[in-house]
Image: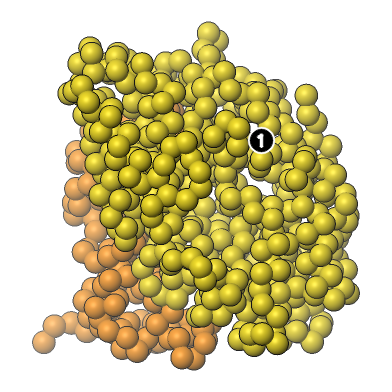
Amino acid sequence: MSVLTEKVITRDWDRPGQNTLAVYKANGGYKAAMKALELPPAAITDEVKKSQLRGRGGAGFPTGLKWSFVPSLEKNNKPRYLAINADESEPGTAKDRYILEKDPHLLLEGIAIACYALGAHTCYIYARGEFKYPSAVLDKAIAEAYADGIFGKKLLGRDFELNVYQVRGAGAYICGEETALLESLEGKKGWPRLKPPFPAVVGLFGCPTVVNNVETIASLPRIFEKGADWFNKLGFGKSGGTRLVTVSGAVNRPGTYEVAMDTSLRELIYDQAYGQGLPEGRTVKACIPGGSSAPVLTGDELDVKLEFDAFKPLQSMAGSGGVMVMDDTACMVRCLWRVARFYAEESCGQCTPCREGQPWMTRIIRKIEEGRGERGDLDTLMNVAAAIAPWPPIGLGNTICALGDAGALPVQSFVTKFREEFEQHIRLRRCPKGDKPWGVFGEFK
Amino acid sequence: MSDPLFTPDEQKHFDAGIAELLSHYPTDRKSAAMLPALRLLQTMKGWLPPEGMKLVAQRLETTVERCYEVATFYVMFHTKKPGKYVIDVCTNLACALRGAEGLLSYLEQKLATRAGENGEKYFLRETECLASCGTAPCLQVNEDHHENLTRAKVDALLEKLA
């Protein structure tokens, strides 16, 4: 049993007026940034390395290490940029929006620290287009920070200019991919770039750029308030700190919770502090642990920690912390169809395996769900998926960005782990769950 | 002669908006302001009329074709005039597990329209995950977010749209 000893991100969420500068400052806000800015930039990066902070956007890449890839000014004297990824779109994930809504200055204080460490004088926050309310709160917070002299010509009174702008997207999942995000920031359609070169060397406008997730940057003020060691000790293994996870689907209390890194999926689903279990008589049939692109787990695989490295033996990933729970009344074919349809819809169209493969897979799954499946369909499905990305997952698929893998891995994991249910659909020529493939939740059953 | 795109006041608002946006980017990168500029135009006009697209292209020193390339890539931009109320219903997995398909057919029935059809008053669409997974099911009406939906909430919401 793991216990969350101290909250990092959500600590002040319940305080009234927390999203205003006055309340934020009255409770010690921006003191951590003042403290951090006493250090030389390289020492700030070293502290972040020591804290074992890892990227919360999905990949879990060590943040300090990412920063250290930015070349020195002697090697490359172009301007540097920080881009904040607030394009939260991974199905199942709802955490960054709450940071923007409830504690936007925590993010802005983190930006002050990161930009100073990186020598970046401009920061763009790329917020999801659909986030009307979170973006409005953030805009107000940015204006407050300028008016208070935090941003602008002199960052917190130092001889360091920092400008922070919010840019709103316009509805494209792909723009959460870091190079597509940069293309979009440059005013183009979101087509991912080939890597290398990585953004740390050739990023926004051809300049060195670091792209970090909202939750990652919002962790920085606490690291400098309480120390890198404190942050690291809160974590588990090679993952420092705590993390935000969203549990959704067939649980009694869906929502977004801050958890210790060594919390297990089972605790998250059943604990009174989190999901509070399933309705009477229901059992967990399947669980997607880290946003819909993370390969699905069965109900027998719930004793896994939510820390970044723990999912590797299960061939899945902790991803962006979007935990979706399916109970025994849910039809796995129908669930997979919903997931596959998303990737077909959101493929940017640049690489053939993804552009053609995702809709093809979606059509086959729909066909099986509607009782028109034929022998051989499952093999075709697995072949199309394998043309996008190999199974078991080894990392890189056959497309420029990871959206290809993100669509192929759910198909491969669902068919591998629930093959009997897919075959049953084909044998019976109908969905065994009939008209109610989702069980009964809420009023719209 | 057709009506001008903007009234003098609107023109002022647009010009000031574009000037502010351009100040956020390097001077040789005017076209980087494309997404915010299109958003500004759409906020003012409700969609992206062709004359407006020309104006954006001119101000950002780029071509109209580039403007359309971007506008048609992103689902939130309307290059055709949408109904008065654009209703986006999330039907992705987390919402579907909590009844989003039922919600969608309830709306189709109440509004006497079909998902994907752009009518004069309503443009009902299925959309992808809106980051409301812990508060499902959800929808957006002209970008205003509504979550934890029940029949009563949907009924009250629709009443306001009449």
Q: Secondary structure at mark 1?
A: loop
Front-lying residue, A201 or A296: A201
Which residue is pictured at 77% across the width and 52% down the height? A52
Q: Tell me the amino acid under the disc marked 1.
A: Ala
Left or right? Give the position of A209 relative to A170: right
Residue that protrudes farthest toward the top in the picture: A281
Q: Position of residue B25 (x, y in %)?
A: 51, 83
Which residue is pictured at 40% across the width and 45% down the height? A389
Q: Is residue A180 visible?
A: yes
Q: Position of residue A260 (x, y in %)?
A: 75, 37
- Residue A254, by quadrant, is top right
Which residue is pictured at 66% across the width and 77% down the height? A71
Residue assigned mark 1 = A310
Q: Chain of mark 1?
A: A
* Chain given the colour yellow: A
* Protein image colouring: by chain
Q: Is residue A33 visible?
A: no
Q: Position of residue A136 (x, y in %)?
A: 55, 62
Which residue is pictured at 32% across the width and 34% down the height? A382
- Residue A7, by quadrant, is top right
Front-lying residue, A112 or A317: A317
Quadrant location of the N terminus of chain B in the rendered image = bottom left
How packed is label 1: few (under 14 Cα within 10 Å), some, or many (20 or more)?
some
Q: Position of residue A230 (x, y in %)?
A: 87, 49
Left or right? Give the position of A73 relative to A344: right
Left or right? Give the position of A139 relative to A234: left
- Residue A340, by quadrant, is top left
* Chain given the colour orange: B
State the count of labels: 1
